[in-house]
Image (cartoon, rainbow, N blue to C red):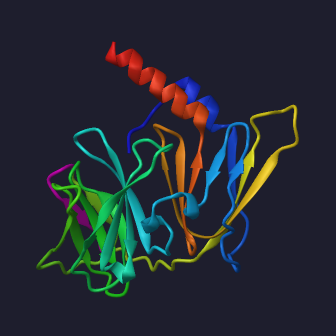
Amino acid sequence: MKQNGDSEFSNGLRRVAIAIVASGTFAAPAVFAKASNIVLVPPTALPESARQTGEAMFLHDTVDGRTLLYIEHSQGSELAILDVTDPVHVRAGGSVRLEAMGPFDFVSTLGDRAELVRFRQAQVDAVLDLHAPQAPILRTVQGLSVQGSAMPLGEDGFMLTNQVGAEVQATRDYQIVDTADSQELYRVFDVKQVREEVTRKETGTTFLLTDGGLYLIRRPAVEMYKNQRDLAYAD
């Protein structure tokens, strides 16, 4: 993910608060909610691959300027691909079958064309090869004996330490609060049973992976600023 330190973006970011309330116990509501500076997009408004439960997800910027969201399905055996370059028009990018031993988590980026993953049950590491973004390949690493935290070494590899920390995936309930318009009462939108959350800073888009599918929190003001900046750079 790229860092954006522009003051306009920082000011916009402070307008949004996402509060983690409690452990989820109910299915995520399928509603479409709008506020003055926030748009909450439910799974039903997204491609079919975004409408089912996922194990994990991560964002990847391709060398040709696209941003892809990968969602792990079917206990790690399938990877769905969404093109989220334009959050207004999220497009399906197909899916890929993986030779996986079970569900896994995305640990860290290894340069521009690989992602380190870790299988949950066995705590074994592998590498998701992204040289072909539409057809990623899961490659096991032979000879690893250390299980613990990982540190990427640029595009050249990664380093493991033996400090093992047990991680338990739990769902949470989120409340999205729009505080942009001080003349009106703040609006609150609920998203239940969130498994994972990731944000694309360039567009301000936050992706919430829930038991009921994928939700998008769009921020049109940030999207417009990015489009204007891109046009200025193009000139």
Q: Note whether 164 is above or below 129 in the view shown.
A: below
Side of 194 where 65 appears, left or right? left
The answer to if 155 sits in the magenta stretch is yes
Image quarter where the C terminus lies is: top left
Number of numbered discs visible in the structure rendering: 0
Which residue appears at 16% of the width and 54% of the height?
131
Q: For residue 125, what is the image quadrant?
A: bottom left
Viewport quadrant of the N terminus: top left
> In the rendered image, which quarter is residue 43 located in?
bottom right
Q: Residue furthest left?
A: 142
Q: Nearer the viewer, residue 13 or 207?
A: 207
Q: Main secondary structure of the magenta part?
A: loop
Please report the residue visible at 44 percent of the width from the left and 21 percent of the height from the top.
Answer: 229
Q: For residue 63, what is the image quadrant?
A: top left
Q: Measuring from the top left, give residue 107's x and y in whole percent.
A: 35, 65
Q: Which residues are magenta?
A: 154-162
Identify the residue at image location x=17%, y=78%.
144
Give the x, y percent position of residue 113: 20, 52
Q: Is residue 184 left or right of residue 97?
A: right
In the image, residue 205 above or below residue 59: above
From the viewer's side, name the closer residue of 150 and 18: 18
Q: Is residue 17 magenta?
A: no
Where residue 231 appears, x then y in whole percent? 40, 19
* Residue 171 image point, x, y percent: 60, 74
Write the residue at 38% across / 81% down: 74
- In the shown orientation, is residue 178 left or right of residue 108? right
